[in-house]
Image: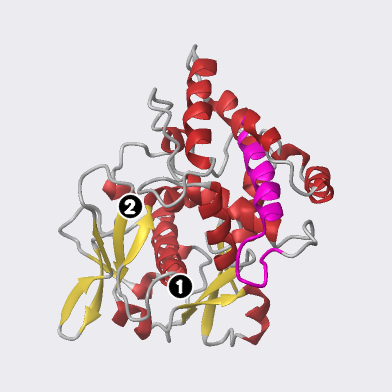
Amino acid sequence: MINELQEFKSYITAPIFDTPRLQPKMLTDNFGATGILYGLEHLLTIIARGFIFGDFYDADKVSDDGMISDNLIATVGNILFSWLGFECAQDYVGDADAINKWNKKYPQADGWLKNYYEKHCTKKDKAKRWAKIEEERSKYLMGEDYRLSVVSINNIIANALELGPLKEQCMIIKKDSVSVKSTKLKDRFQYLFCVDESNKAAKPQEKTVERFLKNIASYLYLKDNHSIGQKFVLLDRIQLLCWYGLDDNKNEADSWYFKRFLFDKGNSKVPIMTAMSGDKGWNFIKLMIDNDFIAKYDIKLIDAIAIDTVDRDEYFIIKDNGHGVGSICCLE
């Protein structure tokens, strides 16, 4: 999640990969008949940023009066609808040279989501289900701007331009005074927390500590898009669990909400994480990592290119290498 370049790569190559980053049941509500594609806006924004700020489109993106170029809209529309596998891609002509450059560099991006759906859907009527998705999603994406709960191509492009180029970040954490030789995350980072022993097993597993660290990184990543001083962020649970490599469409809170992880604050032990949602089953969660905890261990994100400036005697460096178990590593 903090390595947007790696995330982008996973969405434009190998759509029939057996263990994809994009979790099938979560994306499709277990391939239900509703035609829902959860998190579609995020996926399209990542791809749009990869195209817009890649070496593909040479013309001006924004006019002198600040308006997005019609040619850019048509070009990105072609790229995104082609990625979806929707026939309406042909209605967006755009910059032919830029589109050809993209297709030559990322040939598997053409029809990626449709190929992905056909690979992972086991329903006998999956062609009919996909047709419904294409009909409904294309209708919303093709120009219905400024409507509640509707994502359009124009909105996607505007968001992509504001967010800027894809980037890779790493997370740094101040070390404890006690040196631990083990390379396992559960041993190396045990100084960060204590566990509420009245709630389940006292010692967390390796994958639990990995997920806990990913939660912290996700919180810091999302804080960049919130107002300065705001403690809670709006977490899209799908983004987090796709980073986990966990296809949990049942919204089991225990799989990602580690409320038994505590730290010393004053004279008491308090939860490191606080999570709230409006109702059971919601995908968007209000999340906070205690800001005093963040400050205590001087935890922050840095650009990957700045790794060599970090004092490795003082800080651990967490690098994001993709998704699934073992996808983050702690650099010595």
The reply, left or right, for residue 54 in relation to residue 37 is right
- Label 1, secondary structure: give it: loop
Which residue is at a point 42% across and 52% down the rendered structure image? 146
Q: Residues within 10 Å of mark 1 (few under 14, many from 20)?
A: few
Residue at which label 2 appears: 284
The reply, left or right, for residue 141 in relation to residue 78 is left
Residue at which label 1 appears: 224
The type of residue carrying mark 1 is Asp
The C terminus - image quarter: bottom right
Report x, y in % for residue 292: 30, 82
Q: Which residues are magenta?
A: 61-86
Nearest the viewer among 98 and 107 is 98
User: Is residue 66 magenta-colored?
Assistant: yes
Which residue is at a point 21% across and 51% down the rendered structure image? 278
For the question of whether residue 326 can be seen, the reply is: no
Q: Residues within 10 Å of mark 2 (few under 14, many from 20)?
A: some
